[in-house]
Image (cartoon, helix red, strand yellow):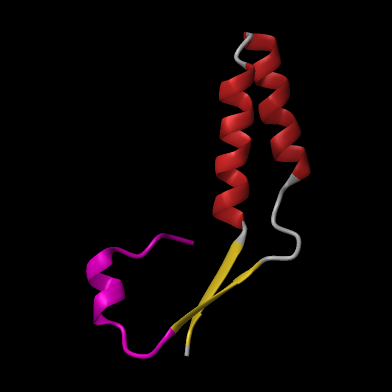
C-alpha cells in the first residue's frame, strides 16, 4: 500500500471515509522495536517508532 499525494487526493471525486481499525497494532513488530531499542539503549526511539507504526496501521480509509 502506498500513500496518496495531495494532488491525487484533490483529483478524486466523492467523499473519503476513514474508520479506526479495531486491531491495528502488530505486537510482534512493536515488541521487536522495543527490544532493539532496549539493546541499543534508546528506549524513547524504540517506543516512538512503535507508536508511528501504530498510527499508520490504525486507519482504514475508503472512497465513496
Relative to 27, is 9 above or below?
below
Q: Is residue 46 rendered magenta in the image?
A: no
The residues colored magenta run 1-15
In this view, the residue in front, 1 or 39, is 39
Q: Position of residue 44 (x, y in %)?
A: 59, 22
Tell whether 14 sits left or right of 23. left
Badge count = 0
Relative to 25, is 39 above or below?
above
| Residue at 70 percent of width and 36 percent of height | 30
Q: Quadrant of residue 58?
A: bottom right
| Residue at 26 percent of width and 66 percent of height | 6
Q: Position of residue 5 (x, y in %)?
A: 29, 63
| Residue at 63 percent of width and 37 percent of height | 50
Relative to 64, is 40 above or below?
above
Q: Position of residue 59 (x, y in %)?
A: 58, 64
The main secondary structure of the magenta stretch is loop
Tell whether 19 sits left or right of 16. right
| Residue at 64 percent of width and 18 percent of height | 43
Q: Is residue 9 rendered magenta in the image?
A: yes
Q: Quadrant of residue 28?
A: top right
Tell whether 54 sits left or right of 15. right
In this view, the residue in front, 3 or 54, is 54
Q: Position of residue 9 (x, y in %)?
A: 31, 74
Amino acid at each position: 500500500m502506498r500513500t496518496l499525494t495531495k494532488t491525487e487526493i484533490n483529483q478524486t471525486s466523492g467523499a473519503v471515509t476513514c474508520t479506526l481499525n479495531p486491531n491495528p497494532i502488530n505486537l510482534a513488530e512493536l515488541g521487536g522495536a522495543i527490544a532493539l531499542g532496549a539493546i541499543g539503549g534508546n528506549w524513547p526511539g524504540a517506543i516512538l517508532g512503535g507508536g508511528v507504526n501504530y498510527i499508520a496501521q490504525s486507519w482504514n480509509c475508503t472512497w465513496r
